[in-house]
Amino acid sequence: QLVAAQPPLEVALAGRVTRLPGGSAILEVTGTITNRTAARVAVPPMNARLLVDGSPMRDWTIPPPAASLGPNRQLAFASSLTDVPQGAVTVQVRFGR
């Protein structure tokens, strides 16, 4: 399950956990940031949180792919984590301040 940030910038997320031989796992999070306003908007870092079976496991920062985003434009971003525990994985992403 993925939970995205709220406007003025919109975030669309996709995530995939890949289990590797030996039991470890990699979480890959990809997405787009969209500016639906009529003005250029600063793009702050994104604060991400990994929850497994509803419990917070790890927080990390996803750097912005650009300092700002023009009107009605999109930016792609990607981030990954290693050593993801077994269980139901949820990722929350919100813009930092």
Image (spheres, grey):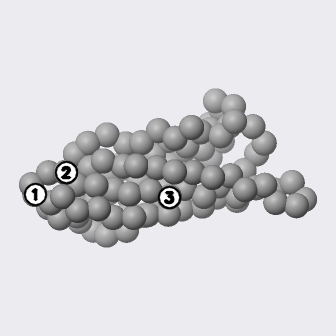
Contact, CB < 8 Å: mark 2 with mark 3?
Answer: no
Mark 2 is on which residue type?
Answer: Arg
* Picture layout, residue 10 above or below residue 53: below
Left or right position of 21 against 4 = right
Q: Residue at x 36, y 49 (%)?
A: 11
Between the C-alphas of marks 2 and 3, the distance is 19 Å
Task: Say if 34 sits above or below 66 in the image.
Answer: above
Q: Quadrant of residue 57?
A: top right
**Secondary structure under badge 2?**
loop
**In the rendering, which numbered label is found on residue 88?**
none
Total count of labels: 3
Which residue does the numbered mark 1 point to in the structure image? 39
Characterize the local packing of mark 3: few (<14), some (14-19) or many (20 or more) Cα atoms within 10 angstroms: some
* Residue lying farthest to the bottom in this orientation: 66
Q: Is residue 66 left or right of residue 63?
A: left
Q: Position of residue 40 (x, y in %)?
A: 14, 61
The answer to whether residue 60 shows anywhere in this view is no
Q: Is residue 3 above or below residue 33?
A: above
Secondary structure beneath label 3: strand
Q: Residue at x 86, y 54 (%)?
A: 23
How far, Cα to Cα, is label 2 from label 1?
Answer: 9 Å
Give amino acid for label 3.
Thr
> Residue beneath label 2, please?
36
Q: Callout 2 environment at 10 Å: few (<14), some (14 to 19), or many (20+)?
A: some
Q: Amino acid at mark 1?
A: Ala
Query: Which residue position is annotated with label 3?
Result: 30
